[in-house]
Image (cartoon, rainbow, N blue to C red):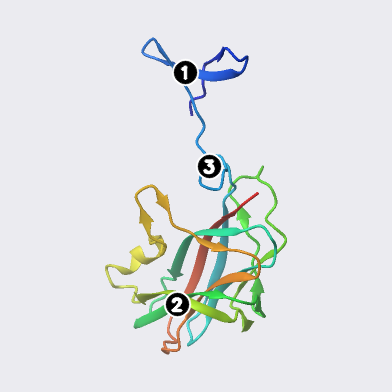
């Protein structure tokens, strides 16, 4: 990490930061994103939804926002375990939702910086919800083969399902009374266990 090593006073009396490279002094700037936040200043949180037995229509996890602060999901990882099974293809679906999940197990977001501000109280998450999480519209489907002997199987947990386009951070924005769920579709496959991880931030 490198910080500016000097500052200069401009004609109006304001102070600008500078940094010297190869005996030349350059002005330093801080970048802002499209919402006006300094790039990299918003806290990141991981939401871990523990693996459960695969079953038709099982909700891996859901995240729902009742608050007024937008929640931004920037990473979705579907994570099967290495349980020895005779694998099969599974179809997953990511949906927007209009209600919070019920039942299952509450998930507490883990901050990646212990000094970060608290996660918004209006945003709740559940693993294996058995009710609620009413579907609004389909965002996309994902297809996996949960056969632990398959050469491509071990790459599945490391594949963010949200596309990255150059320096564009693709994200699912959850505004008030909007949610996101990832679930197995009605195509039945009851072998193996699968978990879910989300990376999220919010406007503060």
In-image side of 63 versus 23 (left or right): right
Secondary structure under badge 1?
A: strand
Query: With 124 as the anchor, is 170 left or right in this view?
Result: left
- The residue indicated by pointer 2 is 93
As drawn, 10 above or below 35: above
Say if 135 sits above or below 165 in the image.
Answer: below
Which residue is farthest right? 121
As drawn, is 67 to the left or to the right of 182?
A: right
Q: Looking at the picture, tell me which residue is in the foreground, 3 or 34.
A: 34
Residue 5: mark in rendering: none
Q: Residues within 10 Å of mark 3 (few under 14, many from 20)?
A: few
Question: What secondary structure is marked by label 3?
Answer: loop
**Residue located beneath label 1 in the image:** 19
Q: Which residue is mark 3?
A: 40
**Residue 109, percent from left and from top:** 63, 59
Q: Earlier in the sequence, mark 2 or mark 1?
A: 1
SS state under label 2: strand
Residue at figure coordinates x 50%, y 18% from the top left: 18
């Amino acid at each position: 990490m490198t910080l500016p090593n000097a500052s200069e006073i401009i004609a109006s009396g304001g102070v600008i930061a500078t940094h010297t490279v190869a005996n030349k002094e350059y002005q330093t700037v801080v970048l802002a994103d499209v919402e006006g936040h300094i790039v990299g200043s918003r806290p990141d949180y991981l939401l871990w939804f523990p693996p459960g037995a695969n079953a038709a229509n099982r909700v891996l996890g859901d995240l729902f926002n009742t608050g007024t602060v937008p929640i931004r999901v920037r990473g979705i990882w579907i994570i099967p375990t290495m349980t020895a099974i005779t694998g099969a293809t599974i179809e997953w679906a990511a949906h927007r939702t209009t209600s919070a999940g019920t039942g299952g197990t509450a998930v507490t977001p883990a901050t990646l910086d212990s000094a970060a501000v608290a996660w918004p109280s209006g945003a709740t998450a559940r693993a294996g919800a058995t009710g609620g999480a009413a579907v609004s519209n389909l965002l996309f489907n994902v297809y996996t083969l949960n056969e632990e002997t398959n050469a491509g199987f071990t790459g599945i947990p490391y594949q963010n399902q949200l596309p990255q386009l150059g320096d564009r951070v693709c994200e699912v924005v959850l505004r008030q009374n909007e949610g996101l769920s990832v679930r197995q579709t009605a195509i039945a496959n009851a072998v193996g266990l699968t978990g879910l991880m989300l990376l999220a931030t919010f406007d503060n």
